[in-house]
Amino acid sequence: LAGRRILLAEDIEINAEIMMDVLSMEEIEADHAENGRVAVEMFSASTPGSYSAILMDIRMPEMDGLEAAAAIRALDRPDAKKIPIIALTANAFDEDVQRSLQAGMNAHLSKPVEPDHLYRTLEDLIEKAEAK
């Protein structure tokens, strides 16, 4: 995962700082979007392929993670359909997981996120996306 670039959508600053520290332990670069709308804008403005994955909080102001994931998937660019989008949320009920998957996300991780589980999920999903 070293050298990979991740887009992190998280509205709570301290949570974003913690997650960026967790990512930096594996030498992963992270760009922070403070809500879903900004995440969609940042992804849209990026060069295709520049992000290896997106970590998306579900509950955010302006545009929540479900709306943002669906908006990214609807973009007319090749990486929008295959980039791994991982939900990060305190909501871990089956219906929450199903809503994440229906919005186009690839995985659903509960907060607080266990770093090793996050790294394994990222490795697995990035490897699958790159094999497509």
Image (cartoon, rainbow, N blue to C red):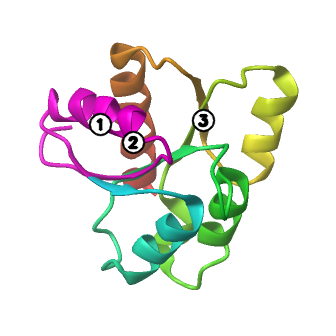
Image height of 52 relative to 57, above or below: below
Amino acid under disc 3: Ala
Mark pair 3, 2: CA separation: 23 Å
Mark 1 or 3, nearer chain start: 1
Q: Quadrant of residue 64?
A: bottom right
Please name the residue that numbered disc 3 is placed on.
107
Q: With 33 as the anchor, is 75 left or right in this view?
A: right
| Element assignment for label 1 | helix
Asked if disc 3 and disc 2 are in contact, CB closer than 8 Å, the reply is no
Q: Which of the two discs, 1 and 3, sits closer to the camera?
A: 1
Q: Residue at 31% x, 29% y: name it.
A: 18
- Residue 26 in magenta stretch: yes
Amino acid under disc 1: Glu
Q: Residue at 46% x, 56% y: name it.
A: 34
Mark pair 2, 1: CA separation: 6 Å
Q: Residue at 28% x, 67% y: name it.
A: 50
Image height of 27 relative to 67, above or below: above
* Residue 17 image label: 1
| Element assignment for label 2 | helix
Picture coordinates of residue 87, whole percent (x, y)? 59, 39
Picture coordinates of residue 77, whole percent (x, y)? 51, 82
* Residue 109 image label: none
Q: Quadrant of residue 5?
A: bottom left
Please name the residue that numbered disc 2 is placed on.
13
Picture coordinates of residue 121, whole percent (x, y)? 44, 28
Amino acid under disc 2: Glu
Q: With 116 as the anchor, is 104 left or right in this view?
A: right
Q: Which residues are magenta?
A: 1-30
Other residues around mark 2 within 10 Å, as few (<14) / some (14–19) / many (≥20): few
Image height of 113 relative to 74, above or below: above
- Residue 117 in magenta stretch: no
Mark pair 1, 3: CA separation: 22 Å
